[in-house]
Structures are given as C-alpha cells and as structure tokens.
Image: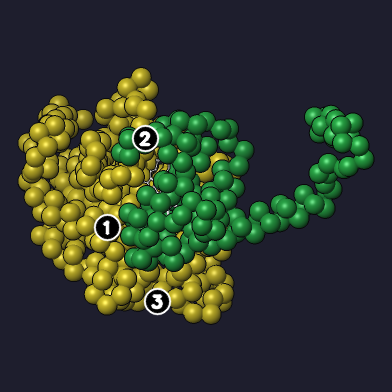
Amino acid sequence: MKKTVIITMCLLLAGPVFADDFTKEDTERWMAQFEQVAAEGRRLWTSPEIGTNGVACAQCHPNAANTHPETYPKFQKQLGRVIQLWEMINWCIRNPLEGEELAADDPRMIAMQAYVHKERRGVKLNPGKH
Amino acid sequence: MSNKTLNGRRDFLKATTSGVIAGMLPVSLVRLAGATESDPEFTFAYISDSHIQHIKGAEFVRNWDRGLIRAVAEANLLEPKPDFVVFGGDLAQLGTKAELDHGAEILSGLNYKMRVVMGEHDYYLDLGEYWSDLYGEHYYSWDHKGVHFITLNSIITYDDWTFDRWESPERRMNEMAGLDNPNGSPFMVGRKQMKWLKKDLSKVSRDTPVVVFSHSPLQKIYKGWNFWTEEADDVQALLKRFDKVNVIYGHVHQIQYNQIDTIAFTSVMSTAWPWPYPESYAQAESHLPILTVPMNRADPFNERDATGWQFMNMHTGRVDLEFNLYNNNNRTVAFNHEKGHPEDTMFSNPKERTPTQSHF
Ligand SMILES: [Fe+2]
Ligand SMILES: [Fe+2]
C-alpha cells in the first residue's frame, strides 16, 4: 500500500521514471545472499578461527542462545555506556576466545551478526532490556 | 523420619548457608549427629564437566583449567571429609590422551576416593578406551552405608552413527562435541547396559535407597542439545519400583531438578562454563521441569560466574545438594519430605525470585 503511494508520487513528480521496483525473484536472490552470509556466520560461530585458544562461540552459546540481539543497543554496566551488539561480540572474542577484536564492518563480524539474528528471528525488539 | 535426622538436615543447611555469608572456608560443615545405623548420614562431593581443552604442546585453555583446579582445592578443604568424590563426565573436550591425562592429573590432587562417570567428550574419540585405562569400567555399581549406587554410561548412541558414518575417530568426536550440531545423535544407555541395569537392580530390595549417576539427564528435556536420554522412560520404569531413587546428572552445565514418581533428579554445574537454558533458544520447544528455579544468568564479565561444584548430604535415602558457585551466592536444593520433591531452600517461593533468574 505504502509502496504504491510512493511509486505513484514518484511517477507524478518525476514523470516516466520507474522507482526501485522489485520482483519475487529479486527477493529470493537477496534472501539467498543473506542466508549465505548467515551460514558463514554459523561456520565462524562453531570454529576456533576467531580466537587463539581453540575455543568457539558455540561452546557457550549453542544456537547462538544467550546473545539476545533484540536487547541491543543496551547499557552494559561493566563498560559504563550503551553499546551495540558487535561491541559485546568483541568482548567475547577478546576474553573467552583470547582473540583480536574485529572492526564493526569486518565481513566476519557482519556474518556472525547475521547468524545471531537469524537464530533469534521472530523475537520482539526490546532495546535496553536486561 | 526421626527428629534427630531433621536436625541433622537443618544443621547441614544452616552450616552451608552461613559458610557462604561468611565467605570463608571450610566450604561446608556437616553434623553427623542425626545418623543412625538404619539411616546413615554421609556426604560426598560432585565435580563435573571440566572440559579440559588442549591447545598445543603443554598449553591448555587456561579458563577451563582454573575451574577444575579450584574445585579440587575447595573440595579438599571440606570438613568433615566427604566419603568420596564423583566426577560427573566431560573431563576432556575432545577426548585426547593429552586432555584426559591433564584432567586426571588435576583430579589426582583430590584427597578422597573417586568415582568417575563417562561423558560424551571423553568417549567419542576412541570409544572410551583410554578413559578405561585411567578409570576402569564404563558402568558399575557398589554399595555404601546401606545405599545402592549405580554409575551409568548414558552417552552411547546408535551403532550406525558410531561405527559407520565418519571417516575418522577425530571427525566423530568433533561431530558429537558440538552441542547444537544437527549431525549429532541422541544419547542412549543401549540394550546391553539396560539388561545389566535390570539384573543389577534385581538384587536390590525395594526400600534400599538408590542413587544413580549418569552424564545425561535420564529424562527428556530438550533433544536438540541432548538434554535427553533416548530410553529415559524405560530407565525410569526400572527405577521407580524403588521407594527412594536419586538421579544425579551432569552434561547440562546448569541447575535443574525434578521429581518423577519416586525418582528425584538433580543436575550439577560445570566447572568450565554455564549453558543457556533451552527455553532461551527461540526456535524450538523444550521442557525444563517446572519445579526448577533456574540459576542466575551468567555475568559475561566474570569468567567463573555460573560455574562451580557440589557438596552433597545423603540421609533418609535422599540427597541434598549445595551448589558451590564460585562467583555467586551458593544455592541449596534439598529434598522436601512433606512435598515429596527437591526444592530450592531460598527461592521456591516465586515472590522471592530475582530478575537475574529470568532466562529468555
Ligand atoms: Fe559438558
Ligand atoms: Fe556432556
């Protein structure tokens, strides 16, 4: 509905230029892209390669449970500020895995977040919750 | 149930709780005054799931080592001395000789007789062969002060998974080591051991207290993470013929307890790391016993939080557990004889619960 309105407005304002429209094939393709990245996230999650001591995230977080992505951003008292999910991921990389932190836009960080969110799909957003 | 026994129990609870408040060792004090010949009272300690993990050469994951070293050191301070210590399985992470040897060396610091349970992480590399060199039979029973004790190997699985599926023992071990691995396989006792169990129990009289040590829960909680034993119903059917049965299990790395007929179930903690309760996995249904008041959610900023070991008091055929939590208030789960099930002595009233006990 909303999309139709936007498209109509674009048509009215800009003449015969088509706004970004997409097909079912497009969404399937994009979903497949997401699934591929999430699968890479799962691979990293269960592999020791993110750290230096052989420990993997999945050892303590089976199915990425207890990562609560829906509660971010949230205040972490130990860090004294409101943080994003990736910062907490870095905490666990640095500590139990004795590894090097990843940049927020590192493809591995994005893949792990894709996996975490996928395992948590359907849970209501609840930013700030503890 | 005599008053004397109740006093003994209360003293146990009081002593353990005040030990916590004072924050000092010896960890726990027990009065044995309530013990009578027909109702002996004794104690034992329970350490489990240390997951000793080899890195390379002489290096092991420091975090897991610390958990086990601490349990051994604290258990040695118990006064009076426990009659024995049980290790509840998953001594190693990937079942290698290096890991089992390193773990066994730490455990050898215990000043007590030990009983050892097989965990899947000890087993699936060589099907328990090296473990046997260290600890002997995979399942066995013995009698102690009028109580019949049974140790089961509850982590075997279907033969086609164990023998026909993997190109190497290392691969097999790795596949079973991933808790949430969809290529895993459900834990089992197996027909041979079921037969043995039946025969073993046939010599025991109905009113003899029975205590079973298994690695996996002998009840069905969540199959996806093997909080589960395939023949749980059959094992329970064999056990519930006895008036007082207690099942103590590891594997779950969290506090769980339950009562099914005459069988009281209680889990033990890991010395290495805690696990989420299965209900915190949003994509699957699970069945945590409703009796269970969960442990606190772990503080990720404290590596020993939600890990620990147990001290147990056996009397009137039931086991009371004190969870010695390294970085949290201890918890006591004791058998409530009026209600007929184990209960948390502090938090059984829902109003007393804390926000940290909510898992989502
Ligand atoms: Fe374990
Ligand atoms: Fe286990």
The answer to whether residue B231 is seen in the rendering is: no
Mark 3 CB in 8 Å range of ligand 2?
no
Report the amino acid beneath label 2: Arg
Provide the secondary structure element on which disc 3 rests.
Answer: loop
As measured in the structure, the alpha-carbon distance from the residue carrying label 1 to the one carrying label 3 is 26 Å
Q: Residue B270's mark?
A: none
For the residue labelled by badge 1, is the local secondary structure a helix, a strand or a loop?
A: helix
Q: CA distance from mark 3 to mark 2?
A: 49 Å
Chain for disc number 2:
A
Task: Tell me which residue sits at (16%, 56%) in the image.
Answer: B72
Q: Nearer the viewer, residue B9 or B119?
A: B119
Q: Which residue is mark 3?
A: B126
In this rendering, is residue B250 above or below A79?
below
Q: Could you tell me which residue is drawn at 84 percent across and 48 percent down?
A: A23
Q: Quadrant of residue B134?
A: bottom left
